[in-house]
Amino acid sequence: MKEQLLTTLENSRNYTLAVLKAMPEANYHSQPIKEIMSFSELLNHIAYGIIWWKENVILGKETDWEPPKTKNQEDTVNYLNQAYDTLRKTVEKAEVNDNFLNAFHSTMDHITHHRGQAVLHLRYNNIKPTEYSF
């Protein structure tokens, strides 16, 4: 079971990074309308969401929502990798039970939800998204 979770996590990482890297740096801060997060804010939100979900939902440690800001695409790639690495280490050490599985899948659901929004940002900028992989 743990290997399956780790595979799911790595697939999520790889596709999320592919979506991020598909956006040219010139469009990285694009925001189709003011009521939604910009592409850069969205990807930063995914990274911080992984860390926040791990702390609050998986480990049960109450953590305030205080995401740091990333400056550019490279910073966000590094931050996403750090977030995924942290979650990977948590999965590797975890006792897998129903509560853990629910928390893990909740984290993946959050990533998928916002990654879908990032794909729409790509399409808005006339960029063909990377083929979905799982």
Image (cartoon, rainbow, N blue to C red):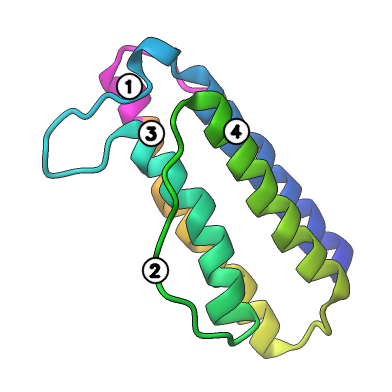
Image point (12%, 33%), residue name: 33
The magenta stretch spans residue 130: yes
Q: Nearer the viewer, mark 1 or mark 4?
A: 4
Near-viewer residue (7 or 13): 13
Image point (65%, 82%), residue name: 59
Q: Quadrant of the C terminus?
A: top right
The magenta stretch spans residue 47: no
Instruction: Return the residue at label 4.
Output: 77
First of labels 2, 3 by sequence position? 3
Mainly helix, strand or loop, the magenta region?
loop
First of labels 1, 4 by sequence position? 4
Q: Secondary structure at mark 2?
A: loop
Q: Amino acid at mark 3?
A: Ser
First of labels 3, 4 by sequence position? 3
Q: Secondary structure at mark 3?
A: helix
Q: Which residues are magenta?
A: 120-134
Q: Amino acid at mark 4?
A: Val
Checking the image for residue 123, the label placed there is 1
Q: Residues within 10 Å of mark 4 (few under 14, many from 20)?
A: many
Q: Residues within 10 Å of mark 1 (few under 14, many from 20)?
A: few
Res 32 seen here: yes
Checking the image for residue 65, the label placed there is 2
- Rendering coords of residue 11 (x, y %): 71, 44
Determine the CA span between mark 1 and mark 2: 29 Å
Q: Amino acid at mark 1?
A: Arg
